[in-house]
Each structure stands twice: as C-alpha cells, then as structure tokens.
Image (spheres, rainbow, N blue to C red):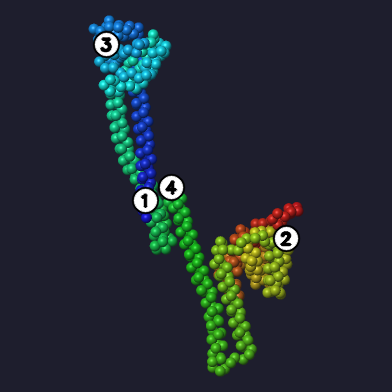
Amino acid sequence: MRKRRSLRSRLTLLVATAVALAIAVCAAVCWFIVRSELLNQVERSLAGPKGPQGTEWIDQYCSGNGLNRPPPPRFQLLQAIDVDGRICVIGSVGVRVVPGDRALAAAPAGRQEFRDGTTDDGASVRVLVRSAGFGRVVMEARPLAEFESTLTTLAWILAGVAALGVVGAASAGLLISRTALRPVGRLAEAVEHVARTEDLDTRIPVEGTDEIARLGTSFNAMTTALAASRERQRRLIADAGHELRTPLTSLRTNIDLLLRSENTGRPLDPAPKRRLLANLKAQFEEMSTLVGGLLQLSRSESEHEPHVEVALHEVVESAVRRAALRAPETPMEVELEPWYLRGDQAALERAVVNLLDNAVKFSSGSVVVRLGGGELTVRDHGPGIARDELPYVFDRFWRSSSARSMPGSGLGLAIVAQAVREAGGEVSLENAAGGGALARVRLPGSPTRAGGPAAEA
C-alpha cells in the first residue's frame, strides 16, 4: 500500500504548487503583453505616413525611371503588385504573395491589412498590405528576427524567474508548514504521551485564538473532564468499598454465629435466632439498596431510558402512596397541580420517593408536599441542616452528623440530583422558616399535555 504523505509535506507541496502556478500564470501573461506591445510597435512603424512623394517614387521605380536610384532606407522590404498581377520588388528580397494580397487590389485606395509572412529566402516578416487604387497593391514588410529574439530572451528570463520562484516557494512552504504545524506537533506529542502513560494531567500551552489554539483548548478541556471523571470513579469505588465494609462485616459475623451454634451442637434459642435472622434480612436489604443506588449513579446521562411525556403530579401522587406505606405514622399534607414534562418516569418517581423518605426520616411532625408551576417542594418539620453542611447534601455517600446513626447509605439525595439534572431541572435544599428542611425541585414543562388545550387563566 502506498504510504500517505505527512501533513507537513502535503502543506509544503500545496504552497509550492500554488506559488508556482501563480508565477507561471504571471510569466505567461507578461510574455503575451510584451509580445503584443512589440508587435504593435512593428505595425506602427509599417503604418507610418505615406505621402504622395513615396507613391510617386514607387511608380517611377517600378516603371523603370528610377532604376538607378537606390530605395530609401525605410523601404528595405517593399514591393508592388499591379492590376495585371505583376510584382515589382523594391530592394534585394521580395515577400511571398498570397491570394488575399491580390484580392485587395480591387479594394478602394487606402484600405490596408496586416499579416504574418515570409520572404523569398524564408525569413519571418510582418507585412502591411495596402491598396493604392487603380488595381495596385503596395506591400511593405519588417523583419521579425529581432522581435523573435527579444521574445526568446524574455521567455528564458521568465522561465528562470519562475524556477527561482518555485524553489523559493518550496522553501517558504517548508518554513510555513514547520511554523504553522508546530502547535499540531505539540498536540500530537501530548496525545501520544496520554495514550502511552494515561497521564491525564498533561496540558498543552495555548497561544492566540486561532483554530490551533481552539484545538489545544479543547484537548485541555477534554483531559480535564477525563481526569475529573476518573477521580469521581475512584472516589465512588473507594466510598462504595467503605460503605459496603460495615454491612459485609456484620453479615459475616452473624452468619459465623449461626454456623458456630449449629456446628457446636448448641443451637440458639428461637427468640434470639429470629432476631438474628431479622437482622440478617435487614442487612441484606440495606446492601440491596446500596447496590441499586450505586448502579443508578454509575449510569451516564446517555444511558437513561428514552424520555416520554410524564405527568409529574401523578408521579408525585404515586410516590406519596409508597412513602405513606413505609411510614404510616407520619401525616402528609399534599397539594398537587397538573404539570407535564418529558423525562424518565421511573427515575423521577424514585427521586421523589427519596425526597419523601429523607423528609420522613427527620420529621417530627407532618411532611408537606406542594406542586405548582413546575416547582415541587417537600418540607419536613425536623431539626434542619447545619449551614456549613448545606453545600454537601447532594454529594455521594455524604451524610450529616445527625444522620450517621440512622439507616441509609448517603446516596438518596445524589440520586435525586442526577434524576432532576437528566430531566433538565434544578434541585436545592435549604432550611425552612420556622424549622425543618425544604427541598425545591424545578422542572421545565407545561400545565397541559403536549398538543392539548391551553391552560385556563
């Protein structure tokens, strides 16, 4: 397979080719302009004023009266054709006659034409054919040897200039490609370094605001995002290992106790055994909840279920029923207005359930749930949250000092934040006036279904 050229060599070749073509076009245009101007000069010298004396002299010369008189210098190549087609050559060499020259004899006096021709000995000339009236044609010519020599010399000069221009263009292209692609080389080295070492702290110096600078900025942003993602992954694994260690240790201890009692032949009494089995079941449920939360949080935003139209008020109503079954002793005040949005219904319902479970866990009174204008609020009547702990409430595995003695993994509010973010909304938690905590969830949507009638004012 043919090896593909490097970007630097292709850029050098492109610049050299473009400059060479430009020089070639300019040289060709220059050559044609000079040729046209020189030819015009020859024609102007041929078309100079021809007074009566010149015509009479030609008549006398061709009639034999001027045979002993040499022709004037400007008539070095001059001849005449009479009405009978006879040619009178004035000078040492004649110009070959073509049919068009004789045809001009019938034209009115003064009509003239220019053409290229040759002498009898084969030299190139520029010919002026002029009708003199009475069936006569006068032909005057100028040699083109000097004209052609000048054009040949000019062509060689332009060819040399073009060759030097191509060499200069290639050198300039190489210099330009090295200068322009230096940032690309640094970027390639950085990418290769990251691929080889997995060092995501690598940064590329960014200079200017051009496309190369934007590419470097994008690469730095990408490595920063990857480093942050890897750090979040590392923290998630470390936190998950820490959270799983306690229930696993407790499970192992309880199971060892059961096995020891059976192996030693001293079974536990029924009541302690039931309590131990109930404890094992609760620990398994806690681990199941923790693993489910980890799976939910490990899911990327591109892996969520397809978004469909969701009736948020129905989702909240279902979540309230589920929370009430788990905490029948906690009264709930519910006020819901219709609100429709596009999102993942299961994820949103789980987020609302987590908010309600969190409120029930800390509330010493009723839990107030309100939905109106796309904003869902859940308020408890508990102790609230310390001001310095508010920024961390949605972090994974974070638990306030007052909640560390209670059941839970610290993933509930993190799952809420993720579900709300995937639906395009915002969530916040604050201390309510009069005590307790107040959670606010704002989700984009409409009070009517898509394509439904407009909401009444």
Q: Is residue 322 visible?
A: yes
Mark 3 sits on what residue?
71
- Of badges 2 and 1, nearer the viewer stands 1
Mark 2 or mark 1: whose residue is earlier in sequence: 1
Outermost residue, right direction? 456
Question: Residue drawn 51% across and 74% down?
Answer: 241
Q: CA distance from mark 2 to mark 1?
A: 66 Å
Q: Which mark is residue 337?
A: 2
At label 3, counting other C-alpha atoms closer than 10 Å, the crowd grade (few under 14, some 14-19, many 20 or more) is some
Q: CA distance from mark 2 to mark 3?
A: 119 Å
- Of badges 3 and 4, nearer the viewer stands 3
Question: Residue drawn 25% across and 7% down?
Answer: 67
Q: Which mark is residue 413?
A: none
Q: Is residue 394 above or below residue 277?
A: above
Residues 329 and 66: in front is 66
Mark 4 sits on what residue?
208
Q: Which mark is residue 5?
A: 1
Mark 4 or mark 1: whose residue is earlier in sequence: 1
Judged left or right of residue 99, residue 149 is: left
